[in-house]
Image: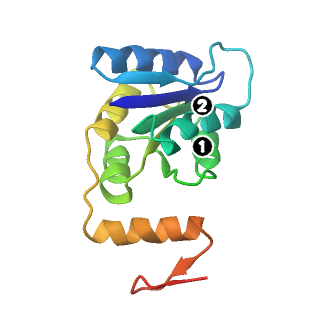
Amino acid sequence: MNIALGADHAGFELKEKLKRWLLEQGFSVEDCGTNSSESCDYPDFARAAGEQVVAGRAALGIMVCGTGIGMAMSANKMAGIRAANAHSEFEAEMARAHNDANVLALGARVLSEAEALKIVDKFLRTDFAGGRHQRRVDKIMALERGRTANAAGQLSH
């Protein structure tokens, strides 16, 4: 499985550690930058990694900034991205199982390396549960297209 990685300067060090771990686990990695701890803008790297996911060149994305908030907000502006900012294994599991999240956003300034690795592991090893959750994901995607869905799942403009 190919994973797209993106980080700003605050997330650079953790991104590099995650990259090594992912490669050790047998994943392939598309490193979308940044490549140093020099100040930069997180939306640029959210876009770069998100584009890999949207285009199907990466199955999932992992984005790292100081808190994960900016990366998640930026990524969620992209059509086809469902990014979750997770601070626990449980949140990562639910993001995948119930929301079919395809991007995980992490905060390098709020998580230890050990916590981040556990969260990433849970995210990557959890499958979407489908079923009743598919209806809800469909409604999320309808919002993205500027449409709404009523309780029965019927779409309107």
In the image, is 150 to the left or to the right of 35? left
Q: Residues within 10 Å of mark 1 (few under 14, many from 20)?
A: some
Q: Residues within 10 Å of mark 2 (few under 14, many from 20)?
A: many
Give the residue drawn at x 64%, y 45%: 74
Give the amino acid type for the residue marked by disc 2 in the picture: Cys
SS state under label 1: helix
Give the residue drawn at x 49%, y 66%: 140
| Pointer 2 residue | 65
If the image is split into quadrants, where does the C terminus sit? bottom right
Q: Are marks 2 and 1 in contact (CB under 8 Å)?
A: yes
Q: Which mark is residue 100?
A: none
- Vertical arrangement, residue 130 with respect to residue 115, above or below: below
- Can residue 108 be seen here? The reply is no
Gap between marks 2 and 1, in whole Å?
Answer: 8 Å
Give the amino acid type for the residue marked by disc 1 in the picture: Ile
SS state under label 2: strand
| Pointer 1 residue | 69
- Vertical arrangement, residue 95 with respect to residue 45, above or below: below
Camera-side residue of 114 and 126:
126
Give the residue drawn at x 56%, y 40%: 50
Q: Find residue 48 and report its horizontal and vertical position in percent.
A: 61, 33
In the image, is 127 to the left or to the right of 48? left
Q: Find residue 101 and report its horizontal and vertical position in percent.
A: 42, 50
Camera-side residue of 16 and 31:
31
Give the residue drawn at x 64%, y 31%: 45
Q: Find residue 127 and report its horizontal and vertical position in percent.
A: 26, 48
- Vertical arrangement, residue 148 with respect to residue 52, above or below: below
If the image is split into quadrants, where does the N terminus sit? top left
